[in-house]
């Protein structure tokens, strides 16, 4: 309750008075409307301290009209904003650009304790700190009320959504481009910093049935959602947008549908998130729908991508024969119509399925071709994933030292790119290598570290991998005993991820 009330003494005092009516949990659930709830303060205090609204209103009334206008418009930002965002979003049609006086107006709001300014820098690559402006949620609730009553809310929220759509599209990391470590980090960091604003823009788009705006945002964010563990959140937005496309609004008006290619892409990406979450039935339905649309448009690259994703689902279900057929067709189309990145991706996908059928020679050949293509174009994402696949092949071939080196190279690159799925695969692969080398303690804690990462990101263990996982755990448990296994597994499970990665790469332990 104290955290939700921003630690404000008056707000906490007023909340304490409500405990007579509401148990703490019930009070907490009502704090989204804190201004209506927290009233009737002590009688022997100034009138402006009788209610939370009176206190904020008193400060607001001291502002001049320009300061009041900016204060109201700042309510559209969730989790704070940059100076650039203020200048772009908070200018009205009448006022024009705000660059000239915005700093003085912001400074006044900070001086009046209605706004907080802090450093925006969060990475070592940034040499100059940029200010970030944040409202306490209690104050933001009041500002939003004022914005709505002014009649300016719709315009301000539209500008906010447009600004963050453009930001997301520019900032999204693109795996198929030549990798630049500083740029990659900078983009992920910027999206993470603005995640609350991006969610707010998505919420506005869904609420106002602006499907095209919402789709642009979602398609810019899906990669971030997977790698940073926002799967449930991302998939929920995707499904809501799909449900809204072409539907009637409450007035009976049918909104304009998404362009066919954007709709197919949205379906395709929703299928990817569904598969990662383990909802294979939904993933198949979506990918088959996207493939049908791509075929109808004659979009061979899209068809190849849909076939590849259907192959991934078949792989996760343990249907390796079907996975091989789908990946072979995907690769055939990719070689003719797609980019080098897509060809390398399809080669790796086919190799993984062929590997599961026991053809290590063909799997190795496919992976070596994929790796060569990816290294030539400096596609670090594909390089890392392909190295991990090669590690798996060499582990099964009994080349344990080579398998370890491949996994460690992949893991190092995955750490630098913060590719959580690759990190997970390497931790699990290194555990199998350690088991094969009879290094049971190492194998046990690696299993624990991998399990922690799965739990943190919300990635269930696919059914087809369950048997291999259970076999690995049973073998380790049998070798060192129940008590030692549980203790060592727990140690790995509790390790911070960065420390687990460092220890995993220290193969001399």
Image (cartoon, helix red, strand yellow):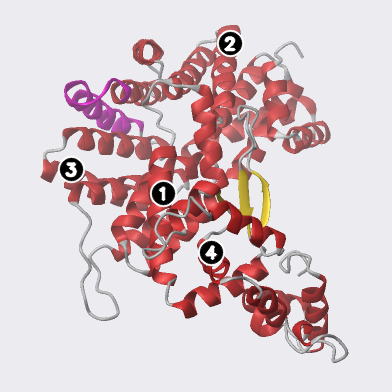
* Residue at far bottom of view: 43
Quadrant housing residue 480: top right
Q: Which residue is mark 2?
A: 405
Rendered-image quadrant of the N terminus: bottom right
Q: Tell me which label, 4 or 2, sits earlier in the chain.
A: 4
Is 327 included in the stretch rendered in magenta? yes
Q: Tell me which label, 2 or 1, sits earlier in the chain.
A: 1
User: Where residue 274 is drawn, which disc sits there?
Assistant: 1
- Observer-side mark, 3 or 4, equals 4
- Observer-side mark, 4 or 1, equals 4
Please indicate whether residue 207 sits to the left or right of residue 384 in the image.
Answer: left
Q: CA gap, disc 3 to disc 2?
A: 40 Å
- Looking at the image, which is closer to me, 27 or 403? 27
Does residue 157 appear in the picture of this structure?
yes
Q: CA gap, disc 4 to disc 2?
A: 57 Å
Q: Tell me which label, 1 or 3, sits earlier in the chain.
A: 1
Q: Which residue is mark 3?
A: 294
- Observer-side mark, 3 or 2, equals 3
Q: Which residue is mark 4?
A: 70
On the image, the x and y values in percent for residue 179 come to 44, 21
- Segment colored magenta: 320-341
Q: CA gap, disc 2 to disc 1?
A: 32 Å
Q: Judging from the image, what secondary structure is the residue with disc 1 in? A: helix
Q: Rate crowding at label 2 as few (under 14), some (14 to 19) or many (20 or more) other CA atoms within 10 Å.
A: some
- Observer-side mark, 4 or 2, equals 4
Rendered-image quadrant of the C terminus: top right
Q: Judging from the image, what secondary structure is the residue with disc 2 in? A: helix
- Observer-side mark, 1 or 3, equals 3
On the image, the x and y values in percent for residue 159 come to 39, 59
Residue drawn 72% across the image and 17% down it: 439
Residue drawn 30% across the image and 50% down it: 267
Residue drawn 26% across the image and 36% down it: 307
């Amino acid at each position: 309750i104290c955290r939700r009330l921003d630690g404000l003494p008056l707000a906490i005092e007023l909340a304490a008075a409500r405990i007579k009516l509401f148990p703490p949990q019930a009070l907490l659930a009502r704090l989204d409307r804190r201004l209506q709830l927290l009233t009737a303060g002590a009688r022997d205090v100034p009138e402006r301290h009788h209610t939370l609204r009176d206190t904020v209103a008193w400060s607001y009334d001291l502002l001049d009209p320009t300061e009041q206008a900016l204060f109201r418009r700042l309510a559209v930002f969730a989790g704070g904003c940059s100076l650039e965002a203020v200048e772009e979003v908070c200018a009205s049609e009448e006022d024009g650009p705000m660059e000239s006086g915005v700093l003085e107006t912001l400074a006044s709001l900070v001086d009046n304790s209605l706004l907080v300014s802090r450093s925006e820098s969060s990475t070592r690559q940034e040499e100059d700190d940029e200010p970030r402006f944040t409202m306490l949620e209690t104050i933001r609730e009041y500002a939003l009320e004022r914005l709505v009553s002014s009649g300016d809310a719709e315009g301000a929220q539209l500008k906010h959504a447009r600004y963050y759509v453009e930001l997301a599209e520019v900032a999204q990391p693109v795996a198929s481009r030549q990798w630049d470590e500083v740029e990659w980090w900078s983009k992920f960091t910027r999206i993470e910093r603005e995640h609350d604003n991006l969610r707010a823009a998505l919420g506005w788009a869904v609420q106002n049935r602006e499907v095209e705006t919402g789709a642009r945002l979602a398609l810019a964010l899906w990669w971030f959602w997977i790698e940073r563990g926002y799967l449930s959140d991302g998939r929920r937005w995707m499904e809501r947008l799909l449900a809204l496309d072409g539907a009637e609004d409450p007035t009976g008006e049918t909104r304009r549908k998404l362009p066919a290619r954007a709709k197919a892409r949205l379906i395709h990406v929703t299928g990817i998130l569904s598969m990662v979450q383990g909802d294979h039935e939904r993933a198949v339905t979506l990918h088959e729908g996207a493939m049908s649309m791509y075929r109808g448009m004659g979009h061979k690259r899209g068809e190849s991508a849909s076939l590849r994703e259907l192959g991934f689902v078949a792989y996760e279900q343990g249907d390796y024969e079907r996975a091989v057929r789908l990946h072979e067709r995907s690769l055939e189309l990719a070689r003719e119509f797609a980019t080098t990145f897509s060809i390398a991706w399809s080669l790796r996908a086919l190799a993984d399925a062929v590997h599961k059928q026991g053809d290590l020679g063909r799997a190795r050949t496919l992976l070596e071709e994929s790796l060569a293509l990816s290294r030539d174009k400096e596609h670090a994402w594909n390089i890392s994933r392909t190295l991990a696949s090669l590690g798996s092949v060499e582990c099964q071939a009994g080349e344990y030292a080579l398998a370890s080196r491949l996994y460690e190279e992949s893991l190092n690159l995955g750490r630098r790119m913060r590719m959580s799925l690759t990190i997970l695969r390497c931790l699990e692969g290194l555990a199998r290598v350690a088991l094969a080398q009879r290094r049971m303690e190492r194998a046990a804690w690696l299993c624990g570290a991998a399990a922690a990462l799965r739990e943190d990101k919300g990635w269930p263990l696919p059914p087809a991998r369950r048997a291999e996982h259970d076999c690995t755990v049973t073998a380790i448990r049998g070798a060192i005993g129940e008590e030692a296994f549980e203790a060592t597994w727990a140690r790995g499970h509790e390790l911070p991820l960065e420390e687990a990665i460092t220890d995993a790469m220290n193969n001399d332990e």
